[in-house]
Image (cartoon, grey):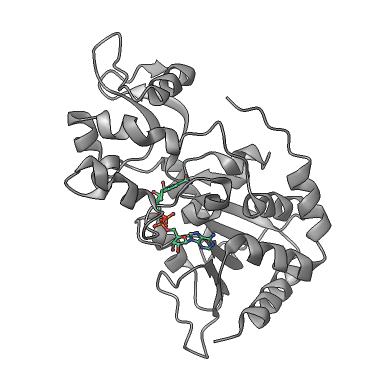
Amino acid sequence: MLSRENAIHQLSNYIKKIRFPGIVLLHGAGISVAAGIPDFRTPKTGFYSRVEKLNLPHPESIFDIEFFDRNPYPFYSIANELRPGRFRPTYCHFFAKLLEEKNKLLRVYTQNIDGLEKMTGISENKLCEAHGSFRTAHCLICRQEIGIDQVNQAIDMKTPLKCTHCGGNIKPDIVFYGENLPSRFFTLSDKDFDSHNKKTCKLLITIGTSLKVYPFASLAEYVSKEIPRFLINNEQSGNFSFQDNKSKDYFIKGDCQQTILDLSEELGWRNELEDLKSSFQFDEY
Ligand code: CNA
C-alpha cells in the first residue's frame, strides 16, 4: 500500500490528467463532522452512540420508517443535531465545487442529509442527494407538503408534527430505512457508471463513509477494474483491495479535511479552496 504522501501525490496526478467532467465523488457523514454534525458509527461520538439513551430496539430504528410511523418521538427528540441551519460547508464540500469550476466533476453523490453540498453553490445537475434532504417535508399518509419552517420549529421543540388534514406523521424528505431512494439516484448512476458510455466515471473518490448503507455503497463497486478508486477516510471501508498491487485502489487514511487541504496544496489549488470557503455567505436559520 502506498504511503499517505505518495497516495495524495498519485491522486493529484490522476486529477491533473482529467480534462473533462470525469470525476465522481461519493460523500458520507465523515465530511460533515468538521462542520459540527456527528457521523453515525464512530464509537462514542457518532449519532448511534448518542441514541443509546433513547432505548430503541436498534440504533437504526431512529431512521426506520415503520418505527417512525409508530413512534416519531425519538426522531423529533434528536433531529436538531442534524437539521440544517447552523452548519457551514467544510473544505471537503468546497472541494467538490472547485472540481466543478475546473470542469472535472462528473457528479457528487452524497449520503448526507445536511444540505451542505448544495450550500456551496454547486450546480444542481452535478449533485445527487441520494438520501434526500431536510429542505422539504410531507405527511406520510396524505402526502401533503408542509412548510419546512414549521417542521424545523417542531424539531427544535422536540415535538412530533402531525398533519392538520389527516393527522398523519410529518417527516422531512430524508430517506429512512425501508424507503426507496429517489429515482434520480438510479437514473444518474446507471449513466455515470455505464462502461459503454464515453462520458462516464474515470476516477472515483470516496470520502468519509463506512460504506455500510446499500444501495449507495454499491456505487463504489460499479466502476470497472481499470478505473482508479480512492478512499479518503479514518478507517478502511467498502470492497477496496488496497493490498493487491495490481489493483487501482488507494487508501488515504486520516482526517479528510486535512487530506483535502494537502491534496489541494499538491494540485496548486489551496488558495482557491481557501477563498471559496472564506467568501461563503451564511445566514443561520
Ligand atoms: P458512518 O457509517 O457514520 O461512517 C462515517 C465514516 O466516516 C466512518 O468510516 C468514519 O471513520 C469516517 N470519518 C468520520 N470523521 C472523519 C474524518 N474527520 N475524516 C475522515 N474520516 C472520518 O456514515 P456513512 O455516511 O457511511 O453512513 C451513511 C448514513 C449516514 C446515511 O444514511 C446518512 O444519511 C447518514 N448521516 C448523515 C449525516 C449528515 O448528513 N451529515 C450525519 C450522520 C449520519
Q: Position of residue 187 (x, y in %)?
A: 46, 47
| The one of 201 and 160 positioned closer to us in this rendering | 160
Q: Which quadrant of the rendered structure holds the N terminus?
A: bottom right
Q: Position of residue 15 (x, y in %)?
A: 71, 68
Q: Is residue 236 above or below residue 214?
A: below
Q: Position of residue 6 (x, y in %)?
A: 67, 82
Q: Residue furthest bottom?
A: 245
Could you tell whether 285 is left or right of 46 in the image? right
- Residue displayed at 45% across by 46% down: 130
Q: Which quadrant of the rendered structure holds the C terminus?
A: top right
Q: Is residue 178 visible?
A: no
| The one of 133 and 33 positioned closer to us in this rendering | 33
- Residue displayed at 52% across by 34% down: 84
Q: Position of residue 251 (x, y in %)?
A: 54, 76
Q: Quadrant of residue 211?
A: bottom left
Q: Is residue 257 visible?
A: yes
Q: Residue furthest top?
A: 165
Q: Is residue 179 above or below residue 192?
A: above
Quarter of the render that holds ligand 1: bottom left
| The one of 230 and 261 positioned closer to us in this rendering | 261
How many marks can you see?
0
Could you tell whether 280 is left or right of 239 in the image? right
- Residue displayed at 40% across by 32% down: 173
Could you tell whether 196 is left or right of 96 in the image? left
Could you tell whether 40 is left or right of 165 in the image? right
Q: Is residue 123 above or below residue 146?
A: below
| The one of 245 and 263 positioned closer to us in this rendering | 263
